Amino acid sequence: MENYTKGETVDVTEEDPFAKLNLQGWTDRIKMNIHAGGKIRNYIGFASKEFKKEERRLITFSGSGDAVSKVISCVEIMKRNHKGGLHQITKIFYTKKEDLWEPKKEDLDRLKVTRHIPAISVLLSKDQLDTNEPGYQAPGSFEEDWGKSTAQANAKRKNYAQKRRSRLHQPRGPASSAHGSGRGDNFRGKNSESEYPKRKHNKYRRKENHSDKNKTGKGVGENGGRKEKDDDVTEKNRD
């Protein structure tokens, strides 16, 4: 594609997924097109203000690509803010976009790349909708499902905490003699009762002798280096 430059992007118009429902007040609906770079509070602020009006009975939230998650967030916030409960119909489909690439050389043709992007469109209504329509969701069903999932998650968390507390309060038994490891009485294996205390005692003795030598400048004996000098003097006198 080094010989081409990207031109315009054309959105192929498709039929509205809710147009076939023949809903009353469809022409006066609130149509919210959600984009990935938009802010949820701005969308909710405008939608809530308009939806409070009595003549406004329908509202749609639509988005594609990275904006799908924001569409779902806006819908759930609107459902929670509306006290009377809202009927919902959800449609999932693909949108078509055509990217046009212009050639840099005269002997090349113009290219058209078609992309299919996942999209979602949600209809919220203050009035009753057709319950047999695919994607229909009754008012309050989200709260019931949410309550069940929350209760299950809390039960699992509580069970895990109880198991962990019981495991921490269990008494620690002796370690296996084959491996000589663990946190029992013999946590150092064979050397736990005999060799390890001696090593610790000898190491302490070496430190003590070294400190005495630094203080007095003598060895471990009573006379230290003086005894060796006296022996040398007596040997010379004998000679």
Image: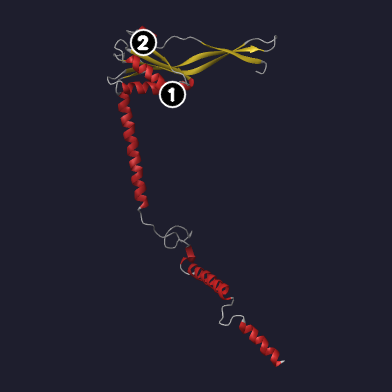
Disc 2 or disc 1, which is closer to the eye?
2
Task: Give the SS element for disc 2.
Answer: loop
Front-lying residue, 26 or 223 = 223
Measuring 34% from the left and 50% from the top, which residue is drawn there? 166
| Chosen colour scheme | secondary structure
Assign a secondary structure to mark 1: helix
Q: Position of residue 218 (x, y in %)?
A: 59, 77
Quarter of the C terminus within the rendering: bottom right
Mark earlier in primary sequence (2, 1)? 2
Which residue is farthest right?
A: 239
Hey, what amino acid is under mark 2? Arg
| Residue located 38% across and 20% down the image | 44
Q: How many residues crowd around disc 1 within 10 Å: few (fewer than 14), some, or many (20 or more)?
A: some
Residue, far bottom: 238
Residue displayed at 67% across by 16% down: 3
Residue 173 x %, y %: 39, 58
Which residue is drawn at the image coordinates 35% and 44% (left, top)?
161
Q: Is residue 132 visible?
A: no
> Would you name the residue on which mark 2 appears?
29
Q: Which residue is mark 1?
A: 69
* Quadrant containing the N terminus in the rendered view: top right
Q: Is residue 226 left or right of residue 95?
A: right
- Residue extending farthest to the left is 84
Query: Is 216 positioned to the left or the right of 39 in the image?
Result: right
**Mark 1: which amino acid?**
Ser
